Image (spheres, grey):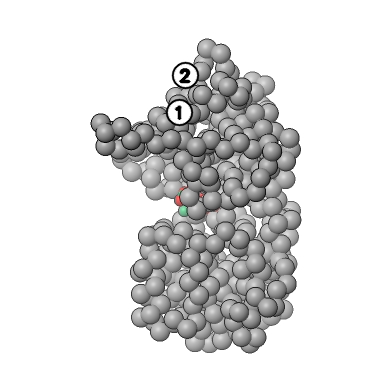
Amino acid sequence: MKIAIVCYPTVGGSGIVATELAYNLASFGNIVHLVSYSPPFRFNKYNENIFFHNVPITNYPLFEFPMYTISIAAKLAEIVESENIEIIHCHYAIPHTISGIIAKEIVNKFSKVKVVTTLHGTDVTLVGKQENFRKIVQYALNKTDAITCVSEFLYQSTIREFSPNKPIEVIPNFVDTNEYKRQSNPKLRRRFADDEEKIIIHISNFRKVKRVPDVVQTFSLIQKQIPSRLILVGDGPDFSEIENLIIKLNLKDKVWLLGEQTSIVELLSISDLFILTSETEGFGLAALEAMSCEVPVVCYNVGGLSEFVFYGINGFLVPLGNIELLANKSIELLRNDTLRQIFGINARKTVVENFDSRIITEKYLNLYLSLINGSIL
Ligand code: GMT
């Protein structure tokens, strides 16, 4: 198959899923054309079946704002025609689906290309709900040929908010469990913590929705009872606020602020616990990646997280905003090495059995095939 994948290149789950999907589709022998305004964050290995297309940003003096939606549409139309693309797969509804729909219109005389939209989270739960975007998201979802949602939670939210007239399939996030595998590295561990200290990790793009200050507050309670260190991976609009909070709580010596990191398996592998404090998560890919490396997850019970974090089995979910309970559940796990190990093994099992990249890529391939064969109209 020949597939064009459009995504945001910046650090964020939708771009990661899109890029990893490109690699997996390519490994099955498909030809993939990645389209974005710069090479996506995780597009860092050469694959002869993947081609990257840069979307040029127009800067004619008349245009005060970049015409990104139109630029992607033009680029897509160009490659659908020149490369005989059969599927345009848009990750995140706006503006990508709109661009996909325009491209399909442009080429409709000589191509039967189909547009697939994957909804990731805030395109429905936050941005899509805003009055100025609601109608355009609604339009996109009614015009695309098929929709996928990354969780049952997002599926329900999409139906509730938009009731699209197109089929929707839940295809969850995935991890390459061969790559995301715990690896022993005592030397690296010792660089971050003393032998008797536990390591807690959080990875996100430091946006408001992630509530990273809650992670710091939780850690502040934990470290009073358990010798421990916190590793914060990521960057984003809340970085300075978090840095100030760390200083205010007198935690500077115990928190590692690493900024963005491309290779996180090593860091997850030296960690004892992953904390996620998001207000909502379409799925919660960062937690899944941690679990694949045998790191149990303690998080707020929001969005799609309860679809793979199982209370008392591979982690704990607590009500949104209950920092004290989040800390208590973390302490319970950090105090009990045997329990934590069992949770870690269960976490990996959950990922390997249900969210491995091969299983999920086949779901996408089946969807593409049914669109091409006309069994979804
Ligand atoms: O929806 C977003 O905020 C953007 C998106 C991204 O690019 O980071 O994140 C979402 O997509 C991920 C991949 O499907 C999901 O795992 C995340 O849960 C989701 N983030 C949110 O819903 C906040």
Please name the residue that numbered disc 1 is placed on.
73
Amino acid type of the residue that numbered disc 2 sits on in the rendered structure: Ile
What is the quadrant of the C terminus in the image?
A: top right
Quarter occupied by residue 2: top right
Which residue does the image show at 62% across and 58% down from the upper left? 288
Circle nearer the N terminus (1, 2): 1
Q: Disc 2 on helix, strand or loop?
A: helix
Nearer-the-camera pick, 83 or 315: 83
Which residue does the image show at 54% across and 62% down from the upper left? 261
From the viewer's perspective, is residue 156 above or below residue 116? Answer: below
From the viewer's perspective, is residue 215 above or below residue 30? Answer: below
Which residue does the image show at 47% across and 75% down from the upper left? 218
Nearer-the-camera pick, 145 or 188: 188
Please name the residue that numbered disc 2 is placed on.
106
- Rendered location of residue 143, percent (x, y): 47, 26
Which residue does the image show at 55% across and 26% down from the upper left? 79
